[in-house]
Image (tube, rainbow, N blue to C red):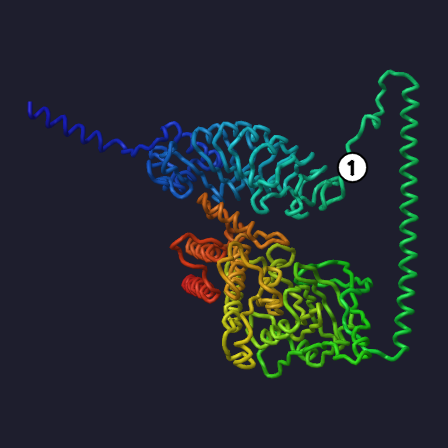
Amino acid sequence: MAKALTALAAALVVLLACCPCRVRGDESPSVTASLVSFLTVLAGDDDGGQTAIRLGWNASIDPCVPGSKISPWGKTVQCFDAGGNNGHIKRIDLDAQGLNGGTIDAALLCAAPAIRVVNLHNNSLRGGLPEGISACSGLTHLIVSSNKLSGNLPPSVAQLKSLQVIDVSRNNFSGQLPGDLSKLGLVRFLANDNHFTGTIPDFNLNNIQGLSFDVSNNNLTGAIPKNATRFGKERFWPNAAGICGETLFAPCPPPPTADDDDDDDGKGDDDDKRKDKKRTVRKIVMYLGYVLLGVAILAFVLYRICFKKKRSDLGLKSKSGGGRRSVYDSSRLTTTTTTTTTTTAATTPSKTPAYSLPTSGEHSAVAEAGGAPAASLVVLRRSGTTSITSNAAAAAAKELRFEDLLKSPAELLGRGRFGSSYKVVVPGGAALAVKRVKDAAVDEEEFRRRMERVGLAKHPAVLPPLAFYCAMQEKLVVYEFQSNGSLAKLLHGSIESSQGPLDWPARLHIAAKVADGMAFMHTTLRGGGATSNSPSGEKAAADGPIAHGNLKASNVLFTAGMDPCISEYGITTAPPPPAAGRDGGGAAAFRADVYAFGVLLLELLTGKATSAQGDGAELARWVTSVIREEWTAEVFDRALLAGSGSGSTEQRMVRLLQVAMRCVDASPSPGSAPPPTMREVASMINSIRDEDDRSFSLEAA
């Protein structure tokens, strides 16, 4: 009997050794087999299951272990680790996995009952998006961008009531966008670069996070959704002729009325005559309106001609009446027309208005009354100092007079919250940029001291003011003109550096240089005592800290050598960051700069622009929401990820993202570290950059 039991035990051991062991999760064998088949179909007919082997998808191994997010199938699969779906697949991420020529089989995919996220971005999938995708009822993210998919977008997509993100951009989809998509609570909808026709569904754009809405480069027509202004025209254009709505495009025509129909309703000739009469009346009214509009335009043109002639006569009388000198008067800008095309930090028009700096009688009136002379242009001498300005601009600034600015043509570069910028070419050919400041919070004397102190603080990454003018409410600051544009244009516009699009090393270099410049200026201009750059200890003690006050991507310009430099430092008072009321005085101003720099880092990492008049809070909220959902990789700019190379590079990108989030954290939790200073931020970024340089050197070796 004992021998028989021993033999039975040995047989069981042999049997267990011959059978593959399987750690069971909650996915059934049929689900795992379906998903492996789904991947095989995605990889194409000639793959033979090699992609599944390469990625570790094995039907004999359960893809999820209860209580763990990490999947035995590898990084392309993520699992639920808690709740009712514990042990089920949560996310399939096949981004850029070389899936060439395969198709999407919804029946195989939706066999996984709890799946939430499907990411098939940047492959070469063909066919269409099948109707059966609606069977994945819990789906929240559907990302199939940058493939070769075609056909219509199935209406069944709108049956996915939990769907928050749809990205079908850069494919060959055609047909109409399903109207019921507007009933979903979408936070991101990207359908650009396809062949969609028809009208845009009436999406509730208030739900969209950040600027994650794009239907450009299609053949759409008709009205754009309400509240689309913040997205900008580029999110809707180009499209077919007839797209209209809001301030981005021409107003949409009113809907046709019953009287416009020409149908024969069988009521006889009397009805036809009445309709013809109504149409005739409408035409008469319309033509009469055109005539009245033409008369109004003609009257306006005649008035302008007479007004110009009168003003010219007055100017001649003023010159012949005593040769009076004059100063800049911001309320009288005369306009001419120029066809000069200039690449600037703010805009790149093909035909822009050119402004002259006209004269006024303010200086003369003061002189005749026996009062003090009006304020003059203060030139900040730079002889023998290190500066990023060109020799031509420095030489022009030394000899610059206010009358030179008045006589030189000035081309409008752009307008912002705190004033307008002009390009002025002074006698001798040097190009200067003149910033007209409209910040009324800084009085004349304070502004004068501020500019003198900023002029003495010199750093290669800070564009120095060459001269300034200050009188009553009018303040001007003169810089060297930078023709290589701004970081905003490089990230979100049409210009590119000579090395091509911005890659990770370039963006890290920009972040480090700007951080160094801001840290230096904060240290040098902190106030409260004498510094090596202060004109005197007493004066430095009397003056408070000077922050930038308006740091943003359009105020980071590029020199002739494409090095970043900070423009417009200290020309306006710094607005407090969100929830900064607990800080006071200079601390709040410096904290606002740190917050603005954090937003700048988010722009560098995400590639997304902030709203024109906003403080970047919208972008910060979007990044926070994505990180909270644990989809950190979706934060980064796709162009940045494409060239990131090794996993260690992505780790450094995440570290820089953490620095940015510390900067924009307006209300840290109790017990957490306080917001960093610019000096601490610069140190953290330079540490990341040093590590990146060492890694590059090792790879090159």
Please determine whether, in this image, residue 641 is positioned above or below residue 125.
below
* Nearest the eye: 203 or 143: 203
Q: Residue 688's spot in the image, x, y percent? A: 44, 62
Q: Amino acid at mark 1?
A: Pro
Residue 437 spot, x, y in % from top left: 68, 66
- Point out residue 371 in the picture as x, y percentages from the top left corner: 76, 79
| Secondary structure of residue under mark 1 | loop
Percent x, y of residue 692: 44, 62
Residue 499 seen from this side: no
Q: Report which quarter residue 320 is drawn in.
A: bottom right
Answer with the quarter of the image where residue 206 lies. top right
Q: Residues within 10 Å of mark 1 (few under 14, many from 20)?
A: few
Is 6 displayed left or right of 68 in the figure? left
Is 640 located above or below residue 435 in the figure?
A: above
Q: Which residue is mark 1?
A: 253
Q: Residue at x 56, y 75 (%)?
A: 457
Instruction: Give left or right: position of 71 versus 541.
Output: left
Q: Quadrant of the N terminus?
A: top left
Q: Residue at x 90, y 62 (%)?
A: 307
Left or right: 500 as drawn, with respect to 583: right
